[in-house]
Image (cartoon, coloured by chain):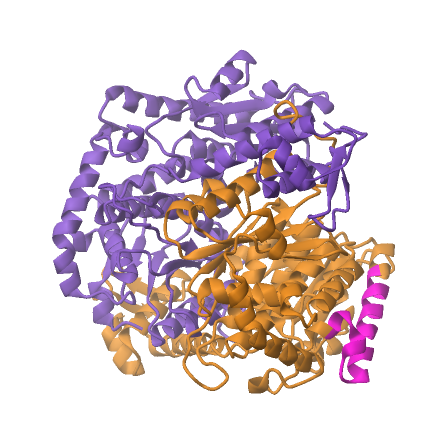
Chain colours: A purple, B orange
Amino acid sequence: MPTFEQYLAWRVALPQPAVELDLGDAGLRDEDLEAAEPRLRDALRAMAMLEAGALANPDEGRMVGHYWLRAPELAPDPAIAAAIRASWEQIEAFAADFHAGAIAAADGQRFRDVLLIGIGGSALGPQLLADALGGRLHVLDNTDPDGINRTLAALPSLAHTLVLVTSKSGSTVETRNGMLEVNAACRRAGLHFPAQAVAITGHGSTLDQLAARDRWLARFPLWDWVGGRTSVLSPVGLLPAALLGLDWRGLLRGAAAMDVATREPDPSQNPATLLAHAWFMLTGGHGRKAMVMLPYADRLVLLSRYLQQLVMESLGKRHDRQGNEVFQGLTVYGNKGSTDQHAYVQQLRDGLPDFFAAFVRVLDPDQGAPPIEVEPGVTSADCLDGFYQGTRAALAEQGRASLTLTLQRLDATTLGAVLALFERSVGLYAELIDINAYHQPGVEAGKLAARAVLELQHRLLAAVDDTPRDVVTLAQRLAAEPFAVWQVARHLVASGRLRGEDLADPALARFACSPSLAV
Amino acid sequence: MPTFEQYLAWRVALPQPAVELDLGDAGLRDEDLEAAEPRLRDALRAMAMLEAGALANPDEGRMVGHYWLRAPELAPDPAIAAAIRASWEQIEAFAADFHAGAIAAADGQRFRDVLLIGIGGSALGPQLLADALGGRLHVLDNTDPDGINRTLAALPSLAHTLVLVTSKSGSTVETRNGMLEVNAACRRAGLHFPAQAVAITGHGSTLDQLAARDRWLARFPLWDWVGGRTSVLSPVGLLPAALLGLDWRGLLRGAAAMDVATREPDPSQNPATLLAHAWFMLTGGHGRKAMVMLPYADRLVLLSRYLQQLVMESLGKRHDRQGNEVFQGLTVYGNKGSTDQHAYVQQLRDGLPDFFAAFVRVLDPDQGAPPIEVEPGVTSADCLDGFYQGTRAALAEQGRASLTLTLQRLDATTLGAVLALFERSVGLYAELIDINAYHQPGVEAGKLAARAVLELQHRLLAAVDDTPRDVVTLAQRLAAEPFAVWQVARHLVASGRLRGEDLADPALARFACSPSLAV
């Protein structure tokens, strides 16, 4: 536990919405902050240039404009400001029509559910908003046919479900597949998919063209100056929030308020510079410890998954901006307290000191029913808060650092402020370690390799005939790696497109064409 | 990508249920395995003694018997075997009555939903089973009143919900609070809680006594030789599985089959010794890399959370069995593929090399509807499998190790086998690093500290009067730390039990008794 003085010295709070960053248990020292001040001020200047429209993502030749989304007046181009404001008007009008039933299902009844098809930044933000603020959002965020079937089967009524398809590029494979699967499900149910579909995508993308051609219900814009992992306050997150009846303007207000606080030039009074500085000190500027997210609120259980993307995709980089190999990153995981105390907190307290904890505490638990006593004078909320305080103290006792974000309450404005705080902290920390936080060069390799797998699948299906042949023979014919052939072949056997013999021993297994070609 | 020879050399498969452990990309070497063989054989012998009833958890003076749960004939005491078999009969009979409506709601209608109240091992296993195998399980796994209200509000009908209360000790605070909150909700709804409640708890525990006294619907046993994190195949997991109509005997069969395979004395032919050896080699025997779980199946998204507890609570220890400070552990996190490829896989591929990946691949995706083509000749399942293969290859290309568990299909038997594999691997690895994997001494400190917080709350409420006083003054009166007083006081203000002034500045804030005492 920090002394009251330590706490006061390492605390910075936003009054409205009430959000406090408490670094009293982060083990920070005045002299380190003083030493870091020039670099923190440089980082703040770089962020100011970014906000002014610099090409902060040079590898992709893009501006980084997610801060404009809640303060369009800051955009470097009036056309951008106008586009943001127009998107708000479009969201407001569409959501009003949706709630009033002016936009309705084919049978004239209101839409009752919203199904979002998207992955990564197109899903994690909307999922967090719905879960944290309350709303039923169905999501397809993968290309697992079993998962897709399960989600569709759980829809109360496909006919009364509005479908949002979200992809900036419009060509994300998982999202395209989800769309095609839902389209097929609509056809099977005698429904016309475009009449219940909405696209959220970049202007002129494949998806945009498809939606225009087939006359989908609506198209909402995405812009190349917004990255997927910072798109939650663009139509990606705001439209679903509006459709679920959430306070989407509150999200913008909260984020804008935090943006103002995190432009503060004095690093010691700026929550984002302090958080970035804490990350630097706690991890040696090299991700040597993971950030374990422990929100003491069931409704924030998805926060860690959201931040996993925001932090790890932004900071997990091989090269710095000078081209040096640095293998950077900051690992994020966690679920919620006090639940996780009964899972892995044993290791946090006693085991590997390879982490620091990031607690989130909600002061006003906003109970629906009047609280009952679980012990004389004690409520469930008292226990929850006691567990937060107790776990923090128990970690500190063992020399494990932590930080705490305290929210007066959990609502749209505080959530917007929290997301903005992490966005800015990631940007500032990236400046400290001199990396580009806004690209993701490493994800392309997996996609290319997956494409090669599908090509091998085509070639293998074309190469087999009635004669069973073993992996090595087939690999020779295809000039492919035997292991790659084996991997593809067993998948094709499982889905009925190849016939397999002696599969228990891969060295002996043989494959031939299947009598029943499923596809 | 491994060569076919590497794959064949580092592959071990269970034929029935079909589960393969593929360590071809784990970078293992023959000479290391040879060198480790004596220690692995020692570990297998220790596991044999554990299975024979040794006090493998000496700190708690307990046997470690979760392997008996699926092979009661191995239990060292016929009474234990009889108790296990009796629990199966009780589960079968109760579930049959539940499904037939012989056990029914107060209005004579069938129960339609199951609500589980439990935390840690009492919740994670049942949640995984329900999510992976299909079934609607409502869960209260925290003492967050907002979360409790939300879960209760989402119940189709509280009157037609069977409530399982699971706690081995019967005194887990979160579980007790959940029970009291549900009891109160029943009272408000005019329902008699005991008539729809079932206890799963240790014989003679507080919970057991309460359930007996109030004549709950049923009581199911838990035994002190089963730890919470390995209780999924006891009534903790089997009863909910049976009530959801899942193949709970298949879970036992699959686990038993894996148990046989993982007793194999040749370490190179035993999947659990190989996995434990891989962990040792990949992490330096000191948890230097995290295990990132990437199941390519939506239904396995909770596997990482389950394994987080099993692995981290078992291995995250300060002392080894000789009393040396070792600060051990093995960090586990992850969600699912290919979804996570669009989140943090950027860092895995390009950034910090602080992890190895554990893929889970399901060969037969078991699609409900006939597959559609998302590209000519390509299904959604092909893309999913291609992404697994591609990501594995892309990681390998960058020198990032991985292992893959390949399941022929995802059903109760394969899931039982997978859980048993990890249980045994954890036990063997604990032998390699000489720690007690079956206790959790570090979680007590947080509970004690939380208890102290509640005591301070009582004392603070008793100490305040109409005169507002600042934190330092109150702390002096209470002989407490000012920071602790501040933390408790602001919580009490938020819940209406203290009146606060000037809260924006903790150094000036003053507290007095509240005119409205909420509790």
Residue B213 sits in quarter: bottom right
Q: Looking at the picture, how far across and down is residue B407, in whole percent?
A: 68, 50
A150 left or right, relative to A261: right
Q: The magenta stretch spans which residues?
A: B68-95
Above or below B51: residue A23: above
B233 left or right, relative to A250: right
Instruction: Give the main secondary structure of the magenta stretch.
Output: helix
Looking at this view, is B246 or B2 the one in front? B2
Q: Looking at the picture, how far across and down is residue B28, in whole percent?
A: 52, 60
Residue at the top extreme of this rendering: A213
Whether residue B44 appears in magenta in the rendering, the answer is no
A138 left or right, relative to A95: right
Does residue A99 appear in the picture of this structure?
Answer: no
> What residue is rendered at 70% in x and 62% in y?
B163
Above or below B181: residue A398: below
> What residue is rendered at 44% in x and 26% in y?
A169
Q: Looking at the picture, how far across and down is residue B339, in whole percent?
A: 52, 41
Q: How many marks?
A: 0
Above or below B119: residue B84: below
Does residue B250 appear in the picture of this structure?
Answer: yes
Looking at this view, is B116 or B281 the one in front? B281
Whether residue B86 appears in magenta in the rendering, the answer is yes
Looking at this view, is A110 or B309 the one in front? B309
A120 left or right, relative to B54: left
> What residue is rendered at 53% in x and 23% in y?
A198
> What residue is rendered at 24% in x and 64% in y?
B506
Q: Looking at the picture, how far across and down is residue B406, in whole percent?
A: 65, 50
